[in-house]
Every structure is written in structure tokens, then in C-alpha cells.
Amino acid sequence: MMDSLLLSASCTLFAIGAMLDVLGMVRRNESLQWKGALLIATGWLMLLGLLLWLWITLGRPPLRTLGETRILYAAWLPAIALFARWRWKTSLLMAPMAAMAVLFLLLVLATPETRVKALMPALQSAWFVPHVVVYMASYATLALASLSALVLLIRRWRGIQDPAATLELPIRLLWLGFPLLTCGLVIGAIWAKSAWGHYWTWDPKETWAFLTWAFYLIPLHQRAQAGEKTSLWMPLLGFPIVLLCWFGVTYLPTASQSIHTYTD
Amino acid sequence: MQQVALDSKEPSYTEAVALLGGLVVGLLCLQALRTPSIPHMATAPAAWCIFAPMAVLFTIGLAWSKNVLVRFLSGVPFAIVSLIFTTIGALLGTLIVQHPRAGDALGMLQKLGLTDVFHTPWFAALVLSLVVNLSLASGRRMRDVRFSDVVFCTTHVGTALVLAGGLFGNLSSVQGTLRLHPGKANGTLELDAGKTLELPFSLVLTSFSVEPFPLELTLGERMDEGVVPRKGGKPLPALTPGKSLDIAGWRVTCESALPSAEPDLHIMEDPTGRIVLDLRLKAHDSEIQFPLLQEFSPRELPGDRFCGLLEAKENGAAAILALARQALAQDAAMGALFVTDGHRMTTFVKDEAGTCVEKHGDDAFLPIALGPMILTPGRLYRAQVQGTWKAASVLNPQPTGAARVVAEKNGQRKEGWIASGPDGADGLDLEPGVTLMLLNPQPKSFQSDVLLEGRKHVIRVNAPLVHQAWQFTQASYEVASTGQPISVLRAMRDPSLPVVWTGLVMLLVGSMGALWILPNLMKREQA
């Protein structure tokens, strides 16, 4: 099956790329790190190919089910990590990013879904693709903020003193991810107005989207106070909230009242 | 000296917690003692009610920026405490079932408003505290006009507008459901609280159409609960008559594909003057067919016989039962017949020897629970009726799909009908563990063609109709017992919408502008 093949190939390339990156960091060999990045980039291109293949065979954007959004999320992770590497000259993210991407892709492989072409009328909207794509980009960015915070906290615990610029990496990613989160929220409100008649109904999913957005306001405001440095714990704690918003809502007592349900 | 000391006092988290906590507790106690009702402000001018107070707060923030109260209410501690309290309230709204059914034992939770969190005075007070904070903070910030201050104001005023607009919308908006029957005018809105509202105009549904998706074939496995689709793999091409596919080594040809079926049962008089029943099913631009019956699929009935469903009022039930026995005995092509008076179901099934077997059941919803039925296209059921009775349609509102397929492999040939439906699918077993089945059909689109004040409009999902500040959205549809579709529209009027949209645009623009703030802040810190 084409989808399993591409998923497995991407997982393998991410895993090998991550190992080369770690090896390069330990041996201070930049050439190894670049090779690792190249393999990760190749895996990323395969994921893009998979998304394109799904779009063509299903005849609709592959963004409807939980599995499909996981693939998109796993495709955004290396893109943001490679951008961070280029922009802020840091290779801190590559290995943890690859590990997270592999985890999500393995989840997709372990829980195959029925490939249904039909797209319900409410999802047949020009807002569907931007809403999901922007949201997954924001989730990936915020996830990388959490991962970088985790890595830095582990390094601190091990007694490694990182320079100030490196310690700013989580907040830089938050500052990038938050406008994307806001954008996704606004697009969702505009779409809800035309599809359901009201831009906001305090649906459990919408409420959790608000909770996620409100949570990230705290570290951003902390940092915006000139001279204050943000605790690394705040970006770290944000990701579980993102996960709750993404698919934890399904398990809440009010889940049956939500119209934002993923269907297989 | 004392004045300077007061002005230089930093806002504290403790004071913010005390103030907001006291406010929430006070309102909760009020809620528990007696449910306060917030007056509905349907006719209040939204823009004035929102912009004017916000402008006043903005000006206060600008003019009295050093005032201790202004600094407290516009400060980060007050904002964060207010935000935390609001998020806790919102969190409770996702953990406790909102609007529970009457009779659910939720006593104290209901008294405290926790079963309708987002419409309680205490939640509204928390949102209002955020609006006050954001408006004052924006005013204070505009003392110096730098890029970062402009971005700050854009995001914060935008957020305040959205919150204030949402709050005002809660108090002033009207929303409800409008059900339209074909050919009939309706201007009565069914409000959420069980009341009704007469609109100043009415809509007439001239036609309602549902377009189904093409049938989707898939492989499944027969389990205890029925046929279950397999997961993963490439989706199969759409099923179209005459087309062949290679599936799991089998060459599968589709003879006829019927994406949906609409039952049509009515009385007619035959040329001899007898009253007869004409039972047909119309498929979407295709030939006649019936949906599939879960328990009596063609593989259980010998050959492709057909079935019928009759609904009769109690006073006619005896006549109908006699009719059924007679029809089954006389009509060789008749395989099964179901008669219901809405409370009991009597089923007649004919075996290969032509013996009729009767089964009785007590299930008022049996016609729906039975699911769809399959009949040979083009067959007509005729019977003689004695006594008075009333015809009714087949009670199965969901779209159903069916297809006749032929599968061949290594000299083996299997053929039959496969179908889908709301109560499970029926498939064609090719070999152990391999069953051909249809995925549940879904409506691709449905739309209402309406007449409003002499003008034609089309209302579709994602394409609402806006008229006199009312927005009509195509929410769903139902099928009446007569088989006619009922278009279900959601109607909404919210005078605060322009304020909310303005706020959202400002929030979006400001958020993008904020991307430049952190790098500039870091550069200044390094300098």
C-alpha cells in the first residue's frame, strides 16, 4: 500500500537523520549534522508526496480524519525545525523533532482508517483547508517550543550552561506559533458563521481552542515585559493543553455536545 | 509625599485575586439563592453600547494613566488573574454537561449556573473585567506612539471588541430554528428556550434537493455485529453501472448502482375501479428500487423477490393483515410483507415452497430499526383493499444506497445486491474474510430553494441567506412521515456582529505585527 510505504519510509529517514544529527553534535561534526538534516528533509518531501497522493486518490483535501491531521502535523514539524535551524542557527531541535514526528507517524500506521472519499457538506468550504493547515502549523510550532524547553531543562539539570540566545529559542517559537494559532482561531470563527450560523457557540472544542490561546498569552506577556525572562516551564506545559484541544476533547464528558468530531 | 507613594504603588496579584474572587463568589451566591436574569437587549444599538463605554475607558487610561486604580485595573496582574478565572470557568463548561435534560440530578451544579456556564452573570462579569482591563491598558499605552505601542493597541483593542461584542451578542442576539415544508410559507421561529417568534416575513420552500455522493465500494469483514469495513489501503473508485474493478483477485462488475432511494407509497384506482396500493421507490435520477432490509436480504429470500411495507391505522389493521395474506398467496414474486400500525409489526415471509409464515413484534420503531429494504426494480405491488385505511410511506428518513454486483474469479461467480444504511450494511461474501460492501452513503449537498418577498433564493450549507439582519443557514433536513423532506434552517440575528468582525480583523493584523516585536525587543535589550 502506497500510504504505508511512504509513512514507513519517512519514519526511517527521520530516525536515521536524527541519529546522524545527534552523532554529529556529540562529535562536533557539522558535516554529519547536515547529512542528518538532508535525510530529514527527504523524509519531509515524502510526507508531502503522501499528502498529495491522498488528496488525488480521495478527491478531497486529506484533512478530515484524526489520522490525516496527524500526517499533516508530522509534515509541519520538520519544516518548522529546518526553518528554526536556518533562522536561529540552532540544531537543538532536529533530533527531538524527528522523534516526535516518528511517534505520530507510528500512531498513524498503528491505527489505520477507512479511506472515505465523501466530505460532509459543512466541510465543503474554502475555509476548510486554511483552517486546518494553519492550525496544524501552529500546533507543530508550539510543540517544538515545548520540545526545545524540555531539552534546555534537561541540559540545565545536567549542568550545561546554554547561552542566552539559545535559552530564547522556546519563546521565539512561541512568538511564531501564537499568531498562527490566532489566525486559525479567527478563520474558524469566520467559517463557523457561514456554516453553522454563529461564529462562537462555546462548543467544547472551541472552548479548548480558547483555553489553549489564553494559556499561551501568559508566557508571551511575561517575555514582553522588557528584561523579564520567561520560565522554560511555561512553553513545556503548553503542549499537553494543545494535545487536549486537538484530540483530548473527544474523551471529555461534554464530547457528545461537540460538533467538532473527527470521524473515521 | 503620600500622593507620590500611592501613584508608585505596583498593582499586585493578591489584590486582583481578592477583587475578582470576591466578585465571582458574590455572583455565585446570588445565582444559588435566586437565578438572576440578564435583561434581553434585542433592540439596543450594539455599536453605541460597545464603542462608547470602551472609548470612555480608553480615554480614562490615556488621561489618568498614573492613577492607582487605573494602573491596577489595566495592569498585567489584573489581566492574568482575570484570564485565569475566565479560563477556569470555561474549563468547567467543558467538564460539566451543559444544558442537561430535565430530571438529571445535578441540583447544586444547576443552582450555581454550572450547567450553563457561558450564560451566567459571573462568567459575563469575568469577560467584562477583561474588556475593562484591555481598554484601559490600550489607553495607557498610547501615551507614546511607537510601532510596538500601535501593535499592542491593535491586538488589545481588537480582543476587547471581540469579547465585548460576544458579551453583547449574548444579551441581544436572537437565534432559533425554522422548519420549511415544501410549498408552505413559514415565518415562525422556534427559539431555543421553547418559545416562538414571528418574523416580519416568511419563507416559502419551493423545492428541496439532496445530492448524494457516488456509492463507495469497500472491502469488509463479517463480524458478529454485522459487516465492518476494513481499515487502511487505497480507496476504491466510485461504483458506476457497467464498470468493472479488480478487487482482491475478483473481477467485480456493477450492474446497477443506486446512491439513494426515496420511498413513495400512495393509493390509486386501477381501471376496474378497485382501490389498490401503488408502492414504488424512486432513486436519484435512476430506476426504481427499494433499500435493503437487514434481516431479509436477498440472500435469504429465494431469488430476487420483493418486499413491501404498509402502515395502517388500528381500525384498518385487520383488513390490511387479510390483504397481506391474500397478496402473498397470489403474487409469486412477492417475498415478504410488513404491516405496522405504528405499535406492532406483523411480518409475512414466504418460503421457497410458497408457505407463508407470520411473525409478530412489539416495536413502535420497527420500520426504522429494520432499516432499508431491497426490492427488484420496476416491480409493483397490487392488492385489493377492504375497509377504511390510510396509506403512509415507508418510514426510513435516511438516505440509503444499493448496488447489484457480479463478482467472478477462477470460474467462480457470485452476484447479488449489496447495500448500506443507517442500521448497518449488507455485503456480498466473496470468500472467508472478504466481503464486498458499501460505505454509508452521505449527502454531498442539500439545498433549499426558497421564495422570500417575491424573490428566489438558494440556501445551501456554507452559503447562507442574509435578509434584514437575519441570517438563515442550512442546518440539516428531516423527512416527514409522508416522505416529504423538511428543510431545517438555523436563523440568527446578532446586532454585535460588525463589532466582532472589526475586533477579529484588528486581532489578526495585530498578531501578524507582533511577529516583529520580539526581535526588536531582543535587539534593544542587547543594546
Image (cartoon, coloured by chain):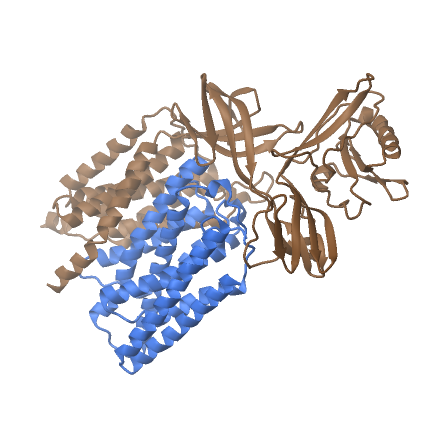
| Chain shaded brown | B
Q: Tell me which corner region of the image, top left, top right, bottom left or bottom right, holds residue B277.
A: top right
B441 shown above or below B488: below
Which quadrant of the figure has residue A229?
bottom left
Residue at image point 17% right, 50% down: B148
Q: Image point 51% across, 64% down: which residue?
A: A4
From this viewpoint, which residue is outermost toward the front?
B411
Name the one closer to the observer, B363 or B230: B230
Query: Depth check: B146 or B261 in front?
Result: B261
Q: In the image, is B269 to the left or to the right of B399?
A: right
In the picture provided, is B374 more to the left or to the right than B55? right
Chain A painted colour: blue
B366 displayed left or right of B195: right
Q: Is residue B80 visible?
A: yes
Q: Position of residue A215 (x, y in %)?
A: 34, 54
Q: Residue furthest left?
A: B1
- Front-most of B220 and A1? A1
**In the figure, B139 relative to A5: above or below?**
above
Residue B443: where, in percent of width, then height? 55, 39
Q: Where's residue B516, x and y in %?
A: 20, 54
Tell which of A92 and B60 is nearer to you: A92
So how many labels did they put on this image? 0
A260 shown above or below A152: above
Q: Is residue A145 shown to the viewer in this render?
A: no
How far across and down, in percent of the image, does residue A244 sit? 44, 56
